[in-house]
Image (spheres, grey):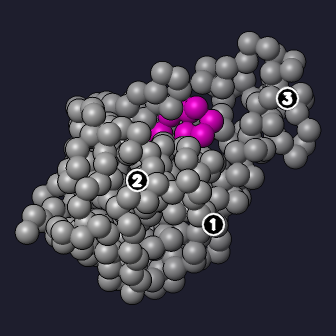
Amino acid sequence: MKEIISLAPGRTCLFGDHQDYLGLPVIACAISRSIKLTAVQNNTGVFKLDMIDIDQQRIIDINQIFSELEPRDYFASSLRVLRRHGCIPNVGYDIKVTGNIPINSGTSSSSALLLAWINFLVTAYGVNEEVTPEFISKMGYLSEVVEHGEPGGMMDHYSIGVGNIVHIDTRDPFSFTVIGTELGGLITGVSGVPKETIGLIGDLKGNALLAIGTIKQSFPDFDLNKTEIEDLDKYRNYLPDRLIPFFEAAIKNHHYTKMALIEFQKPSLDLKTIGALMNQHHAVLRDLLKITVPRIDDMINAALKAGAYGAKIVGSGGGGSIVVMAEPGNEAPIVEAMLAAGAIEAYAVTVDPGSRIQ
């Protein structure tokens, strides 16, 4: 019987959290934790999904068109999206789903599952277009964000689908550039505090867009992408006090992402400088957007005291995980310090080449 093995990694955001939905750039990378789909053709008219790690099963009729979607049902939305691109299931599969990406931790386990599923579907049934990492990534974004009307951006899908270290420019026209394939000294720390995604992103996005809209009433030519930190004083007086932190966060985070891109474009990486920029980025996420929780702060402080160059919260916030920049070879004491500070998991990771069929 035909067997297809589809693998998709998790991701970590190095720079640019809460930026992609504002049309600002992001630097992210796929990491060496993954979701694996092992699919064996079963000659029936159904997908039999066995999600072993969470002890859940699901059966989907291959002909189901899902005219109505349940919230966050990405299996369904991706089948609906892919049908529009000529991917028409004609035979069933038994599918085992396993993985080692912590769930609800800010390292994109759900997007990794989605992209592994999409890659399996296009491999099994074909599509009308050339299958490239960009195509897989776009299908993931359409299936998760657009089809469900969710407030997220494109970072998760393109960093997982394209892999490596990627600079994602979310402006129209959208573009991405692979800026590296290796980054030593990366550590992930998992807090065990479930992150809050949709509600938190919706609130932060709404306030940021409201602040930008308010500025444009007085400055019709205002361009967020061209605004520098030095311009903050010029605009603050035009905003109500409650919107200033969201506007300031967007400007500062964009600045640190631009500075980080300069570092990643150098022939030799200065990990201390990259770590220092991470710390500045995290300070904005903590103090202006207020998306950290005490355990996250404790983990970051412990990592820095143990010798890390930099650390920041990853993803939507309210819990989840952190990314740490350390000197390669010095990961072990930092991992131990994070575990002692309350992390339920901490481990070194490497850069992954992205979603693929094995």
Q: Are marks 3 and 1 in contact (CB under 8 Å)?
A: no
Looking at the rendered structure, the kind of residue marked 3 is Thr
Helix, strand or loop status at disc 1: loop
Q: Give the labeled residue for mark 1.
A: 196
Q: Give the labeled residue for mark 3.
A: 214
Residue 175: image location, x then y, percent: 41, 27
Helix, strand or loop status at disc 3: helix
Residue 153: image location, x then y, percent: 54, 44
Q: Quadrant of residue 97?
A: bottom left
Q: Quadrant of residue 168?
A: top left
Kindly give the residue lying farthest to the left in the view shown: 1
- Ranked by sequence position, the earlier of labels 3 and 1 is 1
Helix, strand or loop status at disc 2: helix
What residue sits 41% from the left and 39% below the top?
84
Q: Is residue 123 above or below residue 232?
A: below
Residue 242: image location, x then y, percent: 87, 46
Relative placement, left or right, of 192 versus 181 is right
| Disc 3: CA contacts within 10 A as few (<14), some (14-19) or many (>=20) | some
Camera-near label (2 vs 1) is 2
Alpha-carbon span between mark 2 and mark 3: 40 Å
Looking at the rendered structure, the kind of residue marked 1 is Glu
Q: Give the labeled residue for mark 2.
A: 79
Which portion, as a residue range, is magenta? Answer: 20-27
